[in-house]
Structure formats: C-alpha cells, structure tokens
Image: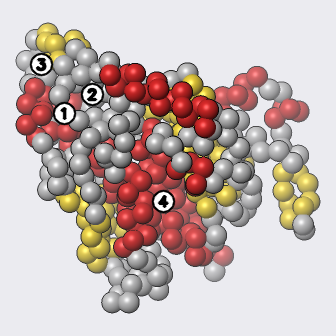
Amino acid sequence: MSSSTGTAFRITTFGESHGPALGVVVDGCPPRLALAREEIQRDLDRRRPGQSRLTTPRGEPDQVEILSGLSRDGRTLGTPIGLLIRNEDARGGDYREMDEMFRPSHADYTYQAKYGIREPRGGGRASARETAARVAAGAVARKLLQVDTGVEVLAWVRQVGSITSDVDPAKVRLAHVERTPVRCPDPAAALRMIECIDQVRREGDSIGGVVEVVARGVPAGWGEPVFDKLEADLAKALLSLPASKGFEIGSGFGSLGMKGSEHNDPFVMRKGRVRTKTNQSGGIQGGISNGEAIVCRVVFKPTATIRKPQVTVDVDGRRRTLAARGRHDPCVLPRAVPVVEAAVLLVLADHFLRQRAIAR
C-alpha cells in the first residue's frame, strides 16, 4: 500500500534502484487526452543522472516505454497507463560493504527492522532512483492540467547550504531555471552554489538545501476542508520524496515573527474576481485553494551516502568504519527540481478531478 498514492488520479510505482527496471501505473487519467511519449521523456531528461559534474555519473538514459493506456493515435483510453524505465547502468558490486554495514542516516537499518530483509544495492526502493517513476507519472498529470485548466507548475533551487537566492515566484520561467546546471534562476547565487557543490564533491562529502515551487493558475475551490487539505496533501507528497526533511507553504516559519494584522491577506476585487492583496497564505486557506499562486518549499538533507569514512555498525552490532563506494549525488537539489514539480502536479491533478466530480 505504501507504493500507491492519490484518490481520483492514482499512481503505483514499482522497481528497485539496481533491478531490471522501474515503472508506474497511472490510474484515473480521463480518456481522449492527447499524450506523446516525448512529453513524458522531456521531464525524465531533466531528472536523469549524469547531467553534469554536480550529479551522480551513473549513465542511465531513462528512456520511457508506454506499455498500456494509449490508443493507436496517441490518446488516453481512460484505462491504466503503464510506464516502464529500464535500468541500464546498474553496478550492484559497488554495494558489497552494505550487505553487512548500515549506512548512517540511510534507510538500510530501518528497512531491515521493518521487513527483516532489504536490498543493499543502491538502497532498493529507498533510492532516489525510484523518483523516475514519479516524474513519468507527473508528466501525465502536467499534460492533463495544461489541457483542462492551464495550471503551470515550476520549481527551482532556492538555497544550497547557507547560499540563498532571490527569485520572484510570479516572474520566474523555465528558461531561467534551466540556464545553469544547479537550476537556480539567480545567476550570482547559482555560481556560488556550483562552487559549493564542487567543493563538497571533491571532499567526498555532500550538502543539502531548499527547492521552492510555484503552481500558477490554480482556481479557487480545489482541496478539502479537514483531513485532505490541499496543503496537507502537498506536504505528504513532498515529504515522501527521498532526503526531504521539511515543508513550508506561503510565509511558513517566517510567520512566527509577524502579527495577525501583518500576516493576513486582505481581500480585494480585481477584474471582477475575489483576489488577495498579498499572498502570505501561499495560495491556500482552510485547506482550499483561493485562486492565488500556490508557493511552497521543501528542505532536502545532505545525501546520506558519502565517500568520507563514517562510523557505523554491521548487521551483528559490531562497530565498523564505512567509506561508501558507488555513484551518488553530492547534492540532490539540481535533480530534485523536476521531482518536486512531479509531486505537486500529481496532487493538483488529483484534486482537480475530485473538484470536477463535485461540480458535476
């Protein structure tokens, strides 16, 4: 059950980091939606490894195969859409030490504690490679939202370590995000981030940071008032991503230093619509979208698997020292950008279909 999510737009991912393939089944996509393999591949290309020296050198082309759910002329049938991504550059031998030792802050020990068995090669399902399946499903959600609602979702790297950027969520565009390998639209901050990631990579270490995401064009009314609040579902989706450790929306933790009179978003009329003068709420009030841009952020920890020697224990409880081999990102953020977009797209597609069912 932990590999499925969504209500009206539901996905189930499968596969391990060093197994034959990864994949996803998308259930609930409406029929007659024109969908091309290239539209899915475009997002996968942004996530795939080996893009630059800032990412893992694992050489996966991540070419998606559409197994089911499309007609001969490339339209969805309303039936489950099966997507497959084969692993072509797996090197399980790099993980022999992990057969016996638990990597600090990785899921090795907790998976063993839960199931009594685990896949040490790349961490199995705990690997960030699983997110390729989410990105593929997110591309389907992106097309659905574009065609039926005009909603646009875009993410970027806001912070690496202590280096922060200055980006306006209302003005940022995909071309701005993609012009540097670190995917930060602030050129000056991007250069400093690249230098920082290069330095920790040379040291055999890693570093974390923050990805920010905006959803523009979401109308008022999406979401639920109690347990399935829109921001609660967004938080769940984003905190389910590997290495994520924190979530905030709108003013987030910055609201701690504000009074109600400063934080409240005054309502105004603009072109015959109810709007807010400010957007401290991040586009959601009472668990339901209010028509403003949805702006949220997710914190990613430093990559757990590093080359620097670390103290740990083995499966017999003996103290050991581990200097991990294998190919790993010194910073997950550049490749996390399309993954964050996918997570938000999947939630919005689900709530769009749920709201459409109510409206009918």
Of the residues under marks 2 and 4, which one precedes in the sequence? 2
Element under disc 3: loop
User: Does the rendering let one see residue 354?
Assistant: no
Other-residue count near label 2 (Cα within 10 Å), few / some / many at <14 / 14–19 / ≥20: many
Of the residues under marks 1 and 2, which one precedes in the sequence? 2
The numbered dot on residue 346 is: 4
Image location (x, y in percent) of residue 290 = 74, 56
Q: Which mark's residue is nearer the viewer, 1 or 4?
A: 1
Instruction: Identify the residue shown where x is 20% and y is 39%.
Output: 122
Q: Is residue 325 above or below residue 229?
A: above
Mark 2 — residue?
305
Q: Is residue 35 above or below residue 343?
A: below
Return the residue nearer the eye: 210 or 244: 210
Count of number-bearing discs: 4
Q: Amino acid at mark 3?
A: Asp
The numbered dot on residue 131 is: none
Other-residue count near label 1 (Cα within 10 Å), few / some / many at <14 / 14–19 / ≥20: some
Of the residues under marks 1 and 4, which one precedes in the sequence? 1
Instruction: Identify the residue shown where x is 88% and y is 33%.
Output: 261
Q: Amino acid at mark 1?
A: Gly
Image location (x, y in percent) of residue 231 = 60, 47
Return the residue nearer the eye: 35 or 281: 35
Q: Are marks 1 and 2 in contact (CB under 8 Å)?
A: yes
Does 123 sit left or right of 140 as displayed? left
Other-residue count near label 4 (Cα within 10 Å), few / some / many at <14 / 14–19 / ≥20: many
Q: Is residue 210 above or below residue 104?
A: below
Mark 1 — residue?
326
Q: Disc 1 versus disc 4: distance between alpha carbons?
A: 31 Å
User: Does the rendering let one see residue 346?
Assistant: yes
Instruction: Identify the residue shown where x is 77% and y is 45%.
Output: 279
Mark 3 — residue?
314
